[in-house]
Amino acid sequence: MTAGCFYQNYREVRLLIIHCSATRYDRDFPVEALRASHKARGFADIGYHFYITRDGYLHRCRPVNQIGAHAAGWNDRSIGICYEGGLDESDHPSDTRTYAQKCSLLDLLRQLRRDYPEAKIAGHCQLSPYIRKACPCFDAREEYAGLEEELSRK
Ligand SMILES: [Zn+2]
């Protein structure tokens, strides 16, 4: 048992999982639309913990101590982060993150790694070879490998 288990609502977080909303880069998918679509799928609320819109704004969707609904099989030990976008003009998977989104995502991951130093960063499709999705449409493990190292040294 780790010391953290004594805190109320503590949850062991081993993974920070990145997603995209699978929205065309030139279309808006505001947080209200995300909420409506997830509720239509039977979720209590947005399945992700965080949602980053193209303007870089970080929407807090679920408290991190609550289990999310974003990656079946990994939800209990992970935090789900989604960015608005992921499709190019032909609806093909593409890293459409704006500069503002990249900055917000990096800030958020840095903060979360401080709170959960054991947690690894991975893209949704990197969780298992059986996940046949392009989500989040960039190599999150590779992009943030340096961040994991930087924070492990401290
Ligand atoms: Zn995903």
Image (cartoon, rainbow, N blue to C red):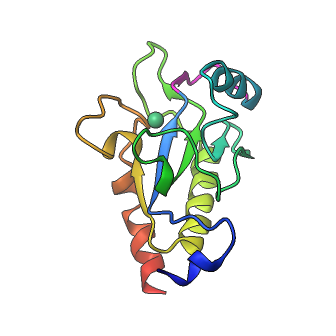
144 versus 47 height, above or below: below
Residue closer to the observer: 101 or 79: 79
Q: Position of residue 36 (x, y in %)?
A: 71, 22
Give the residue drawn at x 37%, y 64%: 145
Task: Quadrant for residue 149, please give it.
Answer: bottom left
Q: Position of residue 12 (x, y in %)?
A: 51, 66
Q: Position of residue 65 (x, y in %)?
A: 65, 59
Give the residue drawn at x 57%, y 40%: 82
Task: Quadrant for residue 90, please give it.
Answer: top left
Residue closer to the observer: 39 or 99: 39
Instruction: Report the magenta residues as a range.
Output: 22-30
96 versus 10 height, above or below: above
Q: Position of residue 104 (x, y in %)?
A: 64, 53
Residue 8 shown left or right of residue 125 in the figure = right
Residue 112 shown left or right of residue 142 in the figure = right
Residue 29 is covered by the magenta coloring: yes
Residue reaching furthest to the top:
90
Give the residue drawn at x 33%, y 46%: 127
Residue 13 shown left or right of residue 112 in the figure = left
Q: Main secondary structure of the magenta part?
A: loop
56 versus 154 height, above or below: above
Residue reaching furthest to the right:
32
Give the residue drawn at x 27%, y 43%: 128
Q: How many marks?
A: 0
